[in-house]
């Protein structure tokens, strides 16, 4: 029996260690930004590279994870598909996790 396929939209804080599923992580950016420390970058206490880390580097040991750079434009829950703005083929899933984060003003 094949492993279930999970799609995660958003590359924020999350644990994937030991997951028994194939995982596709989709994010608009290629890095994870730890926003609680933005104030320290603004006050020159930290360098921007100290709080922004490439997503693929974070997940480099997780062989079950595929990272895709893209912008989700549609989700079809009946077909279990996620459509990206620059891809002709949708990403199919068994489980969908929407963790797209927040935007601060």
Image: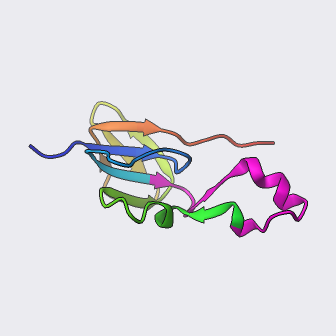
The image quadrant where one finds the N terminus is top left
In the image, is residue 38 part of the stretch drawn in magenta? yes
Q: Which residues are magenta?
A: 26-49
Find the residue positioned furthest to the left: 1
State the image quarter where residue 74 is shown: top left
Query: Residue 54 appears at what percent x and percent y?
Result: 55, 66
The residue drawn where x is 70% and y is 65% is: 50
2 to the left or right of 73:
left
- In the displayed structure image, the side of residue 8 where residue 39 appears, left or right: right
In the image, residue 88 above or below residue 36: below
The residue at the far right in this view is 43
Q: What color scheme is it?
A: rainbow
Nearer to us in this view, 85 or 45: 45
101 left or right, relative to 45: left
Name the residue rendered at 55%, 56% in the picture.
28
Q: Quadrant of the C terminus?
A: top right
Q: Is residue 55 above or below residue 15?
A: below
Residue 102 appears in the figure: yes
């Amino acid at each position: 029996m094949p492993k279930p396929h999970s799609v995660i939209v958003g590359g924020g804080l999350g644990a994937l260690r030991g997951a028994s599923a194939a995982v596709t992580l989709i994010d608009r950016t290629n890095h994870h930004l730890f926003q609680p420390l933005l104030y320290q970058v603004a006050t020159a206490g930290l360098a921007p590279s100290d709080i922004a880390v490439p997503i693929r580097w974070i997940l480099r040991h997780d062989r079950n994870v595929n990272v895709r750079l893209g912008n989700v434009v549609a989700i079809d829950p009946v077909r279990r598909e996620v459509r990206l703005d620059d891809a002709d083929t949708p990403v199919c899933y068994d489980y969908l996790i929407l963790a797209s984060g927040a935007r601060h003003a």
